[in-house]
Image (cartoon, rainbow, N blue to C red):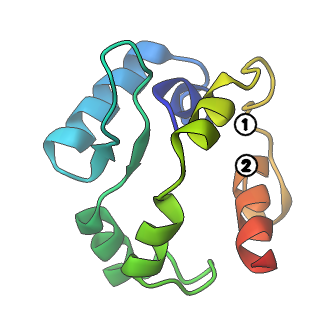
Amino acid sequence: MTLNHVTHLYFDGRSEAAKKRIQRLKRERLIRERERRAYQPSILHLSRLAFAELSSRGMLLEYPSLAWNQLEDRAKVSELTLRHEVSRPRTGAYRREPARDGLVAAEVTKLRLLEEE
């Protein structure tokens, strides 16, 4: 997920607020960045510490059961896949829209993909 995705999904397009929150989460070592070249967009993901914290608070109970090593394996995708996903159209594609059971559309899509595997 890029900062642009985070901005549109969770901050109603307010880029400065998203940037500040992500900086704080990085400082707290809850969000990590995939290694990249200077001209490439930053790819963000949960750290092991964040996963452990979410698990201990019971915040992942609604999602399919995954151990950290399984989630880490899923995050290992090729550069081509990342480039494709990041280059997809951003306008409207990441709008936050209400969905069933209080989930946003993006979360429902992610859950369906996890359940299919």
86 and 3: which is toward the camera: 86
How far across and down, in percent of the image, does residue 74 sit? 53, 66
x 38%, y 78%: residue = 68
Q: Which mark is residue 106?
A: 2
Would you call the spot at circle 2 few (<14 residues within 10 Å), some (14-19), or many (20 or more)? some
Q: Quadrant of residue 100?
A: bottom right
Residue 26 location in percent, x, y?
Answer: 22, 41
The image shows residue 110 at horizontal and vertical percentages of 71, 60
Give the mark nearer the N terminus: 2 vs 1. 1
Q: Is residue 115 left or right of residue 84?
A: right
The quadrant of the picture occupied by the C terminus is: bottom right
| Amino acid, disc 1 | Arg
**Disc 2 + disc 1, Cβ < 8 Å:** yes
**In the figure, is residue 72 to the left or right of 33?**
right
Seen at 44% across and 22% down, the residue is 41
| Dot 2 amino acid type | Ala
- Between marks 2 and 1 in the image, the one whose residue lies nearer the viewer: 2
> The residue tagged with tag 1: helix, strand or loop?
loop
Which mark identifies residue 46?
A: none
Q: In which quarter of the view is residue 90 placed? A: top right
Q: Residues within 10 Å of mark 1 (few under 14, many from 20)?
A: some
Label 2, label 1: how many angstroms apart (C-alpha)?
8 Å
For the view shown, which residue lies furthest in the right direction?
A: 100
Q: Is residue 4 above or below residue 9?
A: above
Considering the numbered disc 2 on the image, is that residue within a helix, a strand or a loop? helix
Image: 7 above or below 117: above
95 vs 77, left or right, is: right
Q: Residue furthest left?
A: 27
Name the residue carrying label 1: 96
Residue located 38% across and 79% down the image: 69
How far across and down, in percent of the image, does residue 51 sit?
35, 69
Q: Is 115 on the left-hand or right-hand side of 6?
A: right
